[in-house]
Image (cartoon, helix red, strand yellow):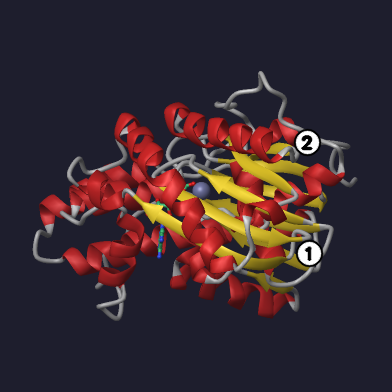
């Protein structure tokens, strides 16, 4: 089944065509990050306006790259939430209108769950597994029993991992989005020169994350060591990576599986990917990380997940709009293994 995916939850307008949830035919994306840079972050109204201008050209470019026409599209999948309301509204409205015009079914998918399906475009998914989703707005650690069966084991209590990097970057005078900028600066030095940033543990919930304290601590280091920007970037990256790897190790001890999936914008980070691969090698398990271009927001992951949701008979009805907030935990079915 040829599914056309639409993604517009944040600052990327994206479209892709995926066959049977696995074979990527074409994928295009236009980010408004250069516009957003002026404001130091994503301004919701600006994002929504940029989506309205970018949507049609991005869909046309995808069709052109795919070599097929709109008449060949059999279904549409769109990110329904969570995300910026106005931004989501553009994608959902466009998808519904296109569905009516082409007379094909439309399904709305969860953005975070979709991130995991970037991995389905590389090889078939293995269940049960553990999944770590690390993006600009969310950090979630899950037990993944099968399609549509995600159990949240831990989540952030405050800032997301990507948000911590974005805020740290801002304190270091780096542009938005901060994650790749922090990575580049951090990798320019061999270590943090003895600087360390603590990541808080959540006492009553060892699999939960808390990154808000890192921001305050980064601010303090920037004031004390203005000439050590690269070392501070390295310390920040080390702290975020350590927090993520530790929670994943703990989750693995509780739920030993053969496969671990990483997804979301922060999974593009080389240090994180390396640390997780090291861990997986020690335990002789498989670590799956999407290729860089599928880590950050894209529509291929949306089309891939949409295929499974359509097969289950899910549809976006005429009066269904964006869904945000939309807790990942609301997707849970069936509980955890004993
Ligand atoms: O998944 P995503 O594209 O959008 C959301 O759903 O939020 O994730 C964006 C986040 C941003 O915080 C960005 O700074 C971070 O992913 N990011 C990275 C890297 N590339 C993007 N963080 C660390 N290293 C990177 N190379
Ligand atoms: Zn995302």
> Going by the image, does 251 lie left or right of 228?
right
Quarter of the rendering occupied by the C terminus: top right
Whether residue 87 is visible, yes or no, is yes
Q: x%, y% of residue 32?
A: 32, 48
Q: Position of residue 79 (x, y in %)?
A: 59, 40
Of tags 2 and 1, the one toward the viewer is: 1
Q: Secondary structure at mark 2?
A: loop
Q: How many marks?
A: 2
From the viewer's side, name the closer residue of 120 and 139. Answer: 120
Q: Place residue 153 in its image quadrant.
A: top right
Label 1's element?
A: loop
Confirm or deny contact between disc 2 and disc 1 (CB under 8 A). no
Q: Residue placed farthest to the top in the image?
A: 319
Locate the N terminus and report the quarter of the image it occupies: bottom right
**Pointer 1: residues within 10 angstroms few (<14), some, or many (20+)?**
some
Q: Residue at 58% across / 57% down in the picture? A: 16
**Which residue extends farthest left?**
227
Q: Is residue 234 left or right of residue 80?
A: left
Residue at position x 68%, y 57% from top?
117
- In the depicted structure, whether residue 296 falls above or below residue 202: below
Q: Is residue 3 above or below residue 203?
A: below
**Mark 2 sits on what residue?**
332
Taking the spot 30% from the left edge, 45% from the top edge, the residue there is 215
Question: Depth check: 250 or 31 in front?
Answer: 31
Residue 172 lies in quadrant? bottom left
Q: Which residue is mark 1?
A: 125
- For mark 2, does the 10 Å Cα neighbourhood hold few (<14), some (14 to 19), or many (20 or more) residues? some
The disc placed on residue 338 is: none
x, y percent for residue 261? 67, 62
Pinpoint residue 221: horizontal percent, then vertical percent.
Answer: 19, 54
Estimate the spatial distance between the alpha carbons at disc 2 and disc 1, rounded to whole Å.
18 Å
Q: Earlier in the sequence, mark 2 or mark 1?
A: 1
């Amino acid at each position: 089944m040829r599914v056309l995916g639409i993604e517009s939850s944040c600052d990327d307008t994206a479209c892709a065509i995926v066959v049977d949830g696995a074979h990527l035919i074409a994928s295009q994306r236009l980010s408004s990050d250069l516009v957003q840079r002026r404001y130091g972050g994503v301004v919701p109204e600006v994002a929504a306006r940029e989506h309205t201008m970018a949507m049609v050209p991005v869909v046309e470019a995808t069709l052109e790259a795919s070599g097929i026409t709109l008449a060949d599209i059999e279904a549409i999948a769109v990110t329904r939430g969570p995300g910026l309301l106005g931004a989501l509204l553009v994608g959902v409205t466009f998808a519904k209108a296109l569905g009516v015009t082409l007379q094909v079914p439309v399904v709305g998918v969860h953005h975070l769950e979709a991130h995991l399906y970037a991995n389905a475009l590389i090889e078939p998914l293995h269940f049960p597994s553990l999944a770590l989703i690390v993006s600009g707005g969310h950090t979630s650690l899950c037990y993944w029993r099968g399609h549509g069966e995600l159990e949240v084991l831990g989540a952030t209590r405050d800032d997301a991992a990507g948000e911590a990097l974005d805020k740290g970057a801002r304190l270091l005078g780096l542009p938005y989005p901060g994650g790749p900028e922090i990575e580049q600066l951090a990798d320019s030095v061999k270590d943090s020169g003895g600087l360390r940033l603590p990541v808080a543990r959540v006492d009553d919930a060892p699999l939960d994350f808390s990154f808000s304290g890192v921001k305050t601590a980064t601010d303090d280091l920037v004031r004390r060591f203005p000439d050590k920007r690269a070392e501070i970037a390295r310390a920040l990256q080390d702290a975020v990576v350590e927090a993520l790897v530790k929670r994943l190790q703990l989750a693995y001890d509780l739920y030993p599986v053969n496969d671990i999936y990483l997804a979301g914008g922060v999974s593009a980070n080389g240090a994180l990917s390396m640390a997780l691969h090291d861990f997986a090698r020690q335990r002789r398990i498989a670590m799956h990380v999407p290729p860089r271009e599928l880590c950050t927001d894209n529509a291929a992951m949306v089309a891939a997940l949409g295929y499974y949701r359509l097969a289950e008979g899910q549809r976006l009805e005429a009066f269904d709009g964006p869904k945000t907030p939309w807790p990942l935990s609301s997707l849970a079915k069936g509980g955890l293994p004993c």
